[in-house]
Amino acid sequence: MAALCKLRFGCRSAFRFSSSVSVRTSFSSDSEDGTRAGAGFAAAFQRQAELQREAENSAPDQSGSIPGQEQTFASLFQAVPVRDKVVVGNIFHVVRDDLYIDFGGKFHCVCRRPAAGGERLQRGSRVRLKVLDPELTARFLGAKTDTTLLEAQAVLLGPLEEREAQGRVQKQD
Amino acid sequence: ISDKMLDLPLEKQDLFRVSELFTVKDLFDARVHLGHKKGCRHRLMEPYLYDSSLDYDIIDLDKTAEDLRRALDKTAHTAYGGGIILFISRRRQFCHLVENTAKQCGEYAHTRYWQGGLFTNAHIQYGPGVRLPDLVVFLSTLNNVFQQHVAIRDARKMNIPTVGVVDSNCNPSLITYPVPGNDDTPVAMELYCRLFKTVINRAKNKRKQMELLHSLSEPSEPSS
């Protein structure tokens, strides 16, 4: 507790000293620079513009260079689609009782409309799914490769509620 | 005039600025890296995969990005030179999308049943003096029964260069500019269609620009 208070006081004094630092000038300038309006604000604005320019110059270097892109794919790609994963899907097509749901994988899944609360699920509704298999395939006798159904298999758990959407972040798989 | 115009794209490295059109992140967001299961994998696609020991194939997007740039560049050069481009896809899910793409960039599409001699027997099936496409773009190289589309072999026979999006269950060997990538998800297909359409339109506009420039500068040439 005492340590936290000390940190906060330390931060405030740092703000007072570095009144020209970009984002924080907004509140410090109101209290302090009333008297020396022109000089303080002008210096702060110039400093902020310089910092923004530096940020813009450094950002394209990271995305434009080829080594950056190689690292990007390896860093972007984290996990393979796994079985028995609970995900949130989006219904993109409805044919009477069949709901075609896209959950961010390679294929969509088709689920039957549940008896309870089924009328609420229309095109564009978000639903919770348990993905049993991201791609339905099987190797038949005498075949060289698997035969694929171009579909995923999932169990519809229910519509996505608002309070569940907030709790979803802390939820385990 | 036409020689100078046609040499211009060969002099500059990336005249149509194809590398600006997409990033690896865009490909990732469009789920281009997702492949089929290990059991559906074609042996010749293994060099394009990120990790062959995984259960579900993941296509290495760095290689895809490079190949896609090369393919878009080839498409742009063909369109710049006034060539005919034919889009082929036998996926019923995307047939409407492909036909619209072709319409919007003023090129051609064939998304229906492929009759045997469309390329190889063209002069008899359509009439004498038919002009065949100068580039064929396959947005899906498989037909409805998961066999390689007949047009790949026929285009090769007629010396027509091909660009094709090959998924992890396709055979990339006969295609001139293969682009390893997902051909099953709508997001990925929309991305490819958008890229090809943009590139073709860019190339055609550049061509019109060059023609205007040359027609304006022509009166001054005899004097020099």
Image: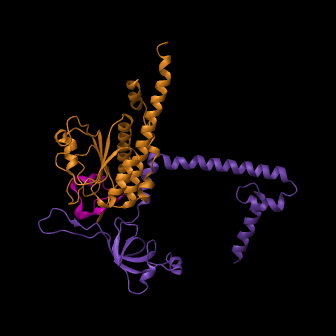
Chain colours: A purple, B orange
Between residues B205 and B149, which one lies in front from this camera angle?
Answer: B205
Residue B68 to residue A91: above or below? above
Q: Nearer the viewer, residue B181 or A97?
A: A97
Q: Quadrant of residue A14?
A: bottom right
Q: Quadrant of residue B75?
A: top left
On the rendered structure, is B101 left or right of A32? Answer: left
Q: Position of residue B33 (x, y in %)?
A: 36, 58
Q: Is residue B212 visible?
A: yes
Viewer can see residue A173: no
Question: Which residue occupies the extreme front position in the image?
Answer: B127
Q: Residue at x 16, y 40 (%)?
A: B124
What range of the chain is rendered magenta? B32-54
**Quadrant in the picture for the C terminus of chain A:** bottom left
Q: What is the quadrant of the N terminus of chain A in the image?
A: bottom right
Q: Nearer the viewer, residue A136 or A23?
A: A136
Q: Nearer the viewer, residue B69 or B96?
A: B96
Q: Does residue B152 sit above or below A129 in this rendering?
A: above
Horizontal and vertical percent for residue A18? 75, 57
